[in-house]
Image: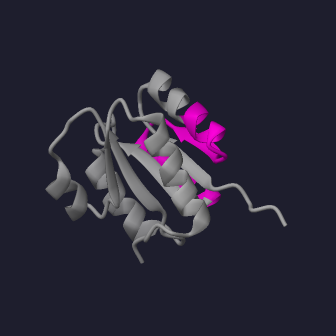
Amino acid sequence: MARSRVRVVVIDDDEATSEGLALILQAAGADVQVAQSAVAALAMIAAFEPAVVFLDLTLPDLSGFELARLIRAQARRQPYLVAVSGVSGEGDRVRAAGIDEYVVKPPAVERLARIVERIAAGTAETAA
């Protein structure tokens, strides 16, 4: 029996970045949807119920930290949250926002693929 594809949402206001991440994640076997604002992302997450959300920390309408808190408060199915940002050293703020993992831009393709593979295999811990 074939394993279903991992549902992933990529949130980044830079279209080239979000589409590039989506292509990488699709190549890793994920079913990917892209949002370029926090408001669009919240609606997408409610409808699509992804297992993983890759989110930029600097969005035009909310910070990624605020968005992560809203996702944690509103999502029926709690996704594994991965912050993707060009700013390093955000570890404490990332954890405080309920984000599970932090990746600095530009992310290594192999690392993104491993995250999707871990979720598909059920070996990544998700927040309850």
- Nearest the viewer among 84 and 64 is 84
Question: In the displayed structure, would residue 70 be above or below residue 44?
Answer: below
Q: Main secondary structure of the magenta part?
A: helix
Q: Which image quarter holds the N terminus?
A: bottom right
Q: Residue furthest bottom?
A: 128
Locate residue 26: give its quadrant. Answer: top right
Residue at x 57% of width, y 50% of height: 8
- Nearest the viewer among 37 and 114 is 114
Question: In the displayed structure, would residue 20 be above or below residue 124?
Answer: above
User: Which segment is the magenta one?
Assistant: 22-48
Residue at x 67% of width, y 46% of height: 29
Task: Look at the image and tell me whether residue 23 can be seen.
Answer: yes
Verify whether residue 79 appears in magenta.
Answer: no
Q: Is residue 121 left or right of residue 53?
A: right
Q: Position of residue 74 (x, y in %)?
A: 44, 67
Q: Position of residue 47 (x, y in %)?
A: 63, 58
Locate residue 106: give its quadrant. Answer: top left
Residue at x 43% of width, y 71% of height: 125
Q: Position of residue 128 (x, y in %)?
A: 42, 78
How many callouts does the rendering have? 0
Q: Position of residue 109 (x, y in %)?
A: 48, 35
Q: Is residue 98 left or right of residue 127?
A: left
Task: Look at the image and tell me whether residue 42 can be seen.
Answer: no
Residue at x 41% of width, y 31% of height: 13
Q: How is the image coloured?
A: one colour
Question: In the displayed structure, would residue 4 be above or below residue 105?
Answer: below
